[in-house]
Image: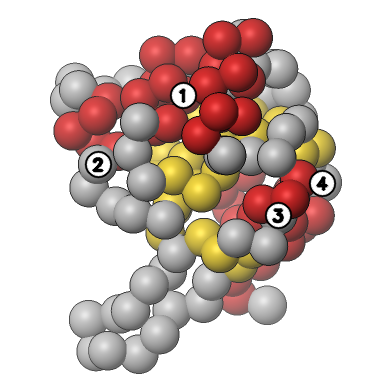
Amino acid sequence: MGPTAEGQPRPVLSVGELAKHLEGEILNCPERSEDLVESLMVGALSVDSGLDYFGRKTNKAVITRGDRPDLQMAALETSTKCLILTGGISPMPIVLHRATEKGVPIITVKEDTTSTLKRIEEALGS
């Protein structure tokens, strides 16, 4: 997402399109569903500081397990268009509060992180 090395634009999806394709639920900030996501990052077990890692890309969707509030909070301190929480786990109230303050929609999905990433790749291909 964003320009490719050859200068060709990469496909982008809106927050709402991501939620629809993933059969996810937008928990907050529905007015931001038209915002465009230019890149994806997966929050997994990382040895880097979350801020350093998530600061590498802008206007991104961050896909991470619903039980990782540390990664979710770090992502919210960078240029994030939405959080996609996997595993059918709702965010902790502090994460939901901070996301709402920042105007970052949280999408919850039932599938695991790997399956969610595959579904987004399918959406980009269509």
Q: Residue at x 40, y 85 (%)?
A: 9
Q: Which one is earlier in the sequence, the residue at label 4 or at label 1? A: 4
Q: Which one is earlier in the sequence, the residue at label 2 or at label 4? A: 4
Disc sitting over residue 33 in the figure: 3
Q: Residue at x 80, y 37 (%)?
A: 25
Mark 3, other Cα within 10 Å: few <14 / some 14–19 / many ≥20: some
Q: CA distance from mark 2 to mark 1?
A: 13 Å
- Judging by the rendered image, the residue that carries numbered circle 4 is 23
- Judging by the rendered image, the residue that carries numbered circle 1 is 72
Question: Are dots 4 and 1 in contact, CB under 8 Å?
Answer: no
Q: CA distance from mark 4 to mark 1?
A: 20 Å
Mark 1, other Cα within 10 Å: few <14 / some 14–19 / many ≥20: many
Which quarter of the rendered picture does the N terminus lie within?
Answer: bottom left
Q: Residue at x 64, y 39 (%)?
A: 105
Q: CA distance from mark 2 to mark 3?
A: 22 Å
- Judging by the rendered image, the residue that carries numbered circle 2 is 55
Q: Which one is earlier in the sequence, the residue at label 2 or at label 3? A: 3
